[in-house]
Image (spheres, rainbow, N blue to C red):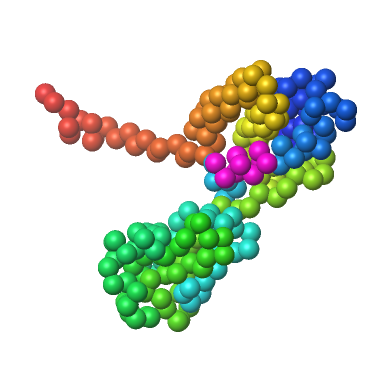
Amino acid sequence: MTRQELEQFVQRLIGKEQIDANAFYTPDELLQALNQAHYDVGLDLRIPRRYYVIETPSPFALPAEALGGGLLSIVDAETNRELPISSVEEANQRYPGWQEWEADYGPPRFVLYDPGNRTAAVNVIPKHNAERKYYLHYVIQPQRLVNALDIPFNGDPNLDPLHPLIAYKAAAYLFESDKTPDGVHQANRMLQRYEIEKARLKSKVLRTPRVQVRNGFWRSFFRKG
């Protein structure tokens, strides 16, 4: 859906007569709710995502497009090992004395990364001065919906089925601003619809189906007589 189509969807959810420059919900408030919902749904589902290859010393910064706290995984290319991601508190518990490890002392053991700090560097521990290759998987900052034809989640067509979630969340935000018992009731109804649809769509769009191996020899070998 485009921004314009999402706005029309929200209008149907809350009642078209309530969207007017002189009504409680103005066009500007609708757009503000839509962009807030767009950001919050992306944060909730951790989408859109990017797979990225980088060769760098440690520490290093995530690409500028990455959402703060959006590092999903990091794999060391040389060892082909996914490195655990820890906060300072977790590192102190799991790796006592890590602060004293010298740079370039053996292969990477874990990554120190603070999701609460938007500008936090990615520290591969032990740190290293020479460039090393890593495979990053991270969440991208969703671009604001400004023009009528803007498409959510940075225009990724694979995420099109998730667009209705933005409308349900935006409708909930508009109803919440009503401050009346009916407004609260309708907001909760939209949030319940959001959770139901999120569970249904997430399993279809964001989860890779498991590969099922059917091997007759395997079944016959373990078949009880």
Give x and y (percent) for residue 118. Answer: 56, 60
Q: Please check the rendered image and state whether residue 172 is part of the magenta-colored stretch, yes or no.
A: no
Q: Which residues are magenta?
A: 36-44
Give x and y (percent) for residue 136. Answer: 50, 60
In the displayed structure image, the side of residue 80 where residue 222 appears, left or right: left
Choose between 217 and 199: the one closer to the eye: 199
Choose between 97 and 75: the one closer to the eye: 97
Q: Is residue 55 above or below residue 170?
A: below
Choose between 132 and 90: the one closer to the eye: 90
Q: In the picture, residue 96 is in which quadrant?
A: bottom left
Choose between 218 and 90: the one closer to the eye: 90
Q: Is residue 11 above or below residue 66?
A: above
Screen quadrant of the N terminus: top right
Give x and y (percent) for residue 64. Answer: 63, 63
Q: Is residue 140 above or below residue 43?
A: below
Q: Is residue 80 visible?
A: no
Q: Please check the rendered image and state whether residue 38 is part of the magenta-colored stretch, yes or no.
A: yes
Q: Find the residue positioned furthest to the top.
A: 182
Name which residue lies at 59% across and 64% down: 63
Q: In the picture, residue 223 is in which quadrant?
A: top left
Give x and y (percent) for residue 81. Answer: 36, 62
Q: Find the residue positioned furthest to the front.
A: 180
Name which residue lies at 33% across and 33% down: 214
Name which residue lies at 66% across and 29% down: 176
Screen quadrant of the C terminus: top left
Q: Is residue 121 visible?
A: yes
In the displayed structure image, the side of residue 219 where residue 51 appears, left or right: right
Name which residue lies at 63% across and 23% down: 184
Magenta stretch, main secondary structure class:
helix
